[in-house]
Image (cartoon, grey):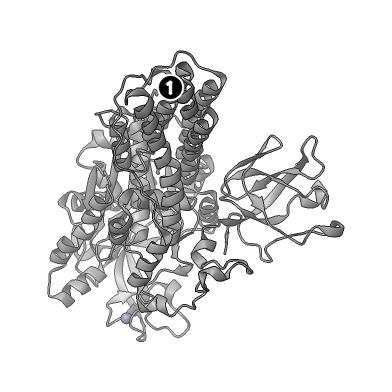
Amino acid sequence: MNTAATKEKVFYLTTPIYYVNDVPHIGHAYTTIAADVMCRYKRMQGFDVFFLTGTDEHGQKIQQSAAAKGLTAQELADRTVLNFKDLWKALNIANDDFIRTTEERHEKTVQAIFKKLLDQGDIYKGTYEGWYCVPCETYVPESSIGDEKICPDCKRPLQVMQEESYFFRASKYTDRLLEYYENNLKAIMPRARYNEIVSFLRSGVHDQSISRTTLTWGIPVPGDDRHVVYVWFDALINYATACGYIDDPEKFRKYWPHVHHLMGKDIIRFHCVIWPIMLLALGVTPPVTVFAHGWWTVEGEKMSKSKGNVVDPFKMVELYGRDPFRYFLLREVPFGLDGDFSEAALVGRINSDLANDLGNLLNRTLQMIESYCGGVVPAAERQGPLEEEIEKFALATLQDVDDRMADFAYDEALKTIWAFIRRGNKYIDETMPWKLGKEGASEDLNRALNTLYRILHLSALLIAPFMPDTAVTFWHQLGYDDDPQARGLAGFDWAAVTSGQKVRKGAVLFPRIDMAVWRKEKDARDGAKKAQTPPVASLPEDDDSKHEPLIDIDAFSTLELRVARILGASEIEGSKKLYKIAIDLGYEKRTIVSGLKEYRSPEELVGKRIVVVTNLKPAIIRGVESNGMLLTAGDGKEGRLALLTPDEDVPLGSRVR
Ligand SMILES: [Zn+2]
């Protein structure tokens, strides 16, 4: 982080306000979990955090569905808002405020802002003209109308309508906003979205119609009751309302300079064009960062109600627990890229990352502390070279996680944490405490167990923002009675982790899920839909001796294949076959080791787009850490080997299926 603002250790983060009439799905859960993790992390780093979420409750659709149900719009909103509030409880979201746009504090703020902009001449009255659907009582945006000019909802013909409207003079501030973006390269992240918005701004922004006379469910325009404020103008202001723009100027002065907005990429035009222009017109600094994350498909398909594949976050929490669900969403896909949700991949992560890596490290260590030290953490007399290396690794991990989180690179932060956890498991293999115990080498044994305990101590703190419940259980098993999040990460001191705690070995944190049993249950849940799929894996079990064993699609989907570009290839000392190859995955750069030296010169490789297996465990090959494997075809005889390369110019990091 590089701004003076961040040094003040104040942090304000928002999710979008969700449309109250929507049924909460994985997309809502994703944004809100990401926001929650970031805020918990910042709190642990000693930041004064303000975390806001809420609901957008005005507009035509609410008015119509309320009427259809025989309710007032307010009654409908009061009911449906609970869908979101309940989900945030189920997902352990620790927001500081929940704003509803029907609240009085918000109405007051919207009207005050409208009046100020009107008084200073940035709002004026004009005529709005657009394609209107009479049965739906709504204007249909130009972008969703085809040549036949029919309503995308009811398929009836549209007509051109005109009405009196107030307009916001957005055009006046376009240059100032461009200048702001030129000076603040992280004001929109990731970079692809930044570029998209800047080029959109360069093409010019029209003044925006911001009131309607065709509906009543909205905030009245001050001094002109025939108009209500158009819903997005009203909605965007929520971020200022909750921060005390009108009610609490001191709060606003404190948090506003540190405001960050998280959202899906579909709504960034409002947030990166209109909203900052509104702020500039008010004399308020635009947000520090608007971060736009990608979209989820479900098992390779676009999520839609008609396909019946909408992922219900309540169901996922019920089936797998909220911590694994939180972990999976942030670990599986780089924040900012599109991702694919599959329960099989979620189960894969539970078994490998959570049960195998994290759970095992805890269980094995506590078991050994019980067996050899009566359950009391032993003191270490002095550090050996291995322990010094691990201490360095620990401190580097802390710094690395902090750097990644500063860029909202949740998946990278988790990879870094897991590299540390895996280092712990490797340390067990290196020191073999059971052998030391048998040999009576108590000084070495104590040092090993003490070091493992420190690794667990730091691991519990690092996972706490992502998996708050797990961290508490973990912490308790380590013999602590306080709250790991309250303990925090700021000023963490490896040397200050003491001995003498009485550990409490408890239940296994993440029992392994038996894939065969899970598959049966999933099929039963999916019912007829799954029964129709061809029986690819139904060969008799003893018949695969002569064949390659068949796998099902879920086994294949555990492979993470992505498109990368080769940045450079260099020799590895003493190796005739291997290159050290630098690759760019778009969201990160990596090194892999590959046996291409006999087939290609470095110059032939540079710039090539290739396919890489990105979720291989790292391996040290000839002293070089290799993180992944590139795909080739052919047996390499007679100097012939083909590199797999995509035939379309897809973005780096694209998933290969
Ligand atoms: Zn219609």
Quarter location, residue 207: bottom left
CA neighbours of label 1 inside 10 A, class few (<14), some (14 to 19), many (20+): some
Q: Is residue 499 left or right of residue 654?
A: left
Residue placed furthest toward the right: 638
The x and y percentages for residue 193 are 51, 53
Instruction: From the image, tell me which residue sits under label 1.
Output: 494
Q: Quadrant of the C terminus?
A: bottom right
Q: Is residue 366 left or right of residue 451?
A: left
Disc 1, SS: helix
Camera-nearest residue between 618 and 427 = 427
Q: Position of residue 393 (x, y in %)?
A: 52, 28
Position above or below: 252 against 234: above
Q: Residue at x 36, y 86 (%)?
A: 157
x, y percent for residue 324: 36, 50
Against 520, is 371 above or below?
A: above
Q: Is residue 184 above or below residue 141?
A: above
In the depicted view, which residue is nearer to us: 539 or 616?
539
Q: What residue do we see at 45% from left, 64% from top?
A: 297
Query: Relative to 199, is 421 on the left or the right?
Result: left
